[in-house]
Amino acid sequence: MTNRRLRRVLAFLPLALVLALPAAPAVAGPTACAAAHSSPAEAAPSQLEHTVLCLVNRERAARGLGRLRSNDRLDRAARGHSRHMVDANFFSHDSPGGASVLQRVKRRGYNGRGGLMVGENIAWGSGSYATPAEIVEGWMNSSGHRANILHRGFREIGVGVAKGAPRPVGGQPAATYTTDFGTRR
């Protein structure tokens, strides 16, 4: 990413799950993932969510990893968190009330008798930087986010996109993205 572009991709924060992973070859363009280059003004949040799932699974497949399955409970947790960040004007893995990703997914019924392993990526962008392709590319260029996407232990994912941003963006279409990764034991 160029310095200019890095400044324009406004904010990416990985959950503190960092693993040392080898560099992987570039993945072919996202043309098969339908709304990869659609802005939030051009596509419904559900289309953007489906496209993020497609792009994340494409990254995993390029490295010989299994596909992540969409999970309704993780989807609801991710959607709720994205919407809450926009509505309450904050950008963090923890809500202003202190709820963590683990607490949020459990509240949505994502539980395991032998425990849970969860991770989360969040991002927001405006204009051309709010497309699923730009968001996933930004995550893949960040070691912590890439570690979550490529973690061999994760089996399920929830994706939530809310139109709007947790910070003023000057009239450009914006979107806030959350991916909640999980494995129940």
Image (spheres, grey):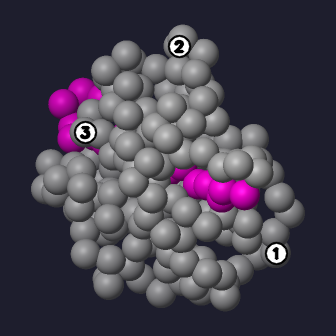
10 Å crowding of disc 3: few (<14), some (14-19), many (20+): many
The one nearer the camera, 114 or 116, is 114
| Position of residue 76 in the picture relative to residue 38 (left or right) | right
Secondary element at image label 1: loop
Residue 152 to residue 97: above or below: below
Q: Is residue 184 magenta?
A: yes
Residue 9 to residue 67: above or below: above
Of callouts 1 and 2, the N-terminal one = 1
Where is residue 130 drawn, in percent x and y? 33, 49
The one nearer the camera, 173 or 54, is 54
10 Å crowding of disc 1: few (<14), some (14-19), many (20+): few
Q: How many marks?
A: 3
Q: Residue furthest top?
A: 97
Mark 3 vs mark 2: in front? 2
Q: Quadrant of residue 83?
A: top left
Which residue is under mark 2?
96
Residues at marks 3 and 1, CA–CA distance in whole angstroms: 34 Å
Q: Residue furthest left?
A: 42
Residues at marks 1 and 2, CA–CA distance in whole angstroms: 35 Å
* Amino acid type at mark 1: Pro
Image quadrant occupied by the N terminus: bottom right
> Would you say the residues marked 3 and 1 are in contact, meaning their CB atoms lie under 8 Å apart?
no
Residue extent of the magenta highlight: 169-185
Which residue is under mark 3?
163
Which residue is under mark 1?
22
* Amino acid type at mark 3: Lys
Q: Is residue 105 magenta?
A: no
Where is residue 141 drawn, in percent x and y? 62, 60
